[in-house]
Amino acid sequence: QVQLVESGGGLVQPGGSLRLSCAASGSIFSIDLLGWFRQAPGKQRELVATITSGGRSNYADSVKGRFTISRDNAKNTVYLQMNVLKPEDTAVYYCNAVILTMELGMDGYWGQGTQVTVSS
């Protein structure tokens, strides 16, 4: 069984920074794509950033130049460094991973979400 555990959310003032982490654990053979999504109240969940196993990253236009996604394959962990935060970045942030396990093959998994609130 695979678990994704996020951490690092919280309350920050506009212009501030936060770093989110998401660690995968369980019977993992390999991790392919990793990503962060977010969902604001009353809105659909949207893609924030993704990173491939080879380190290629992709970002939503709204966060380009402010957010950086990275991964530590030895720790099965993905990070999201968020700088110059804006009130419109307020949302629950979810980690997503495409993971290969011996039991289920390749499948997608979600973390439980971590709240990020940007407010003065």
Image (cartoon, rainbow, N blue to C red):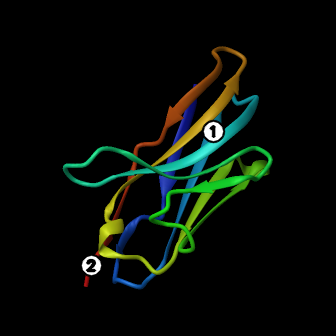
Q: Secondary structure at mark 1?
A: strand
The quarter of the rendered structure image containing the C terminus is: bottom left
Q: Which residue is mark 1?
A: 25
Mark 1, other Cα within 10 Å: few <14 / some 14–19 / many ≥20: some
Nearest the camera: 10 or 51?
51
Amino acid under label 1? Ser
Which of the two discs, 1 and 2, sits closer to the camera?
Answer: 2
Q: Residue at x 63, y 53 (%)?
A: 78
Q: Which residue is mark 2?
A: 119
Say above or below: 42 vs 17.
above
Q: Residue at x 48, y 58 (%)?
A: 7
x%, y% of residue 15? 41, 85
Q: Which mark is first along the chain, 2 or 1?
A: 1
Nearest the camera: 19 or 5?
19
Nearest the camera: 56 or 69?
56
Query: Where is residue 112, by image quadrant?
Result: top left
Say above or below: 59 vs 81.
above
x%, y% of residue 33? 66, 40
Q: Secondary structure at mark 2?
A: loop
Q: How many angstroms separate mark 1 from mark 2 (CA)?
A: 33 Å
> Does the CB distance between marks 1 and 2 fall below 8 Å?
no
x%, y% of residue 102? 72, 17
Q: Residue furthest front?
A: 61
x%, y% of residue 87? 30, 74
Q: Residue at x 54, y 67 (%)?
A: 64
Amino acid under label 2? Ser
Q: Is residue 63 left or right of residue 32?
A: left
Q: Is residue 109 left or right of residue 55?
A: left
Mark 2, other Cα within 10 Å: few <14 / some 14–19 / many ≥20: some
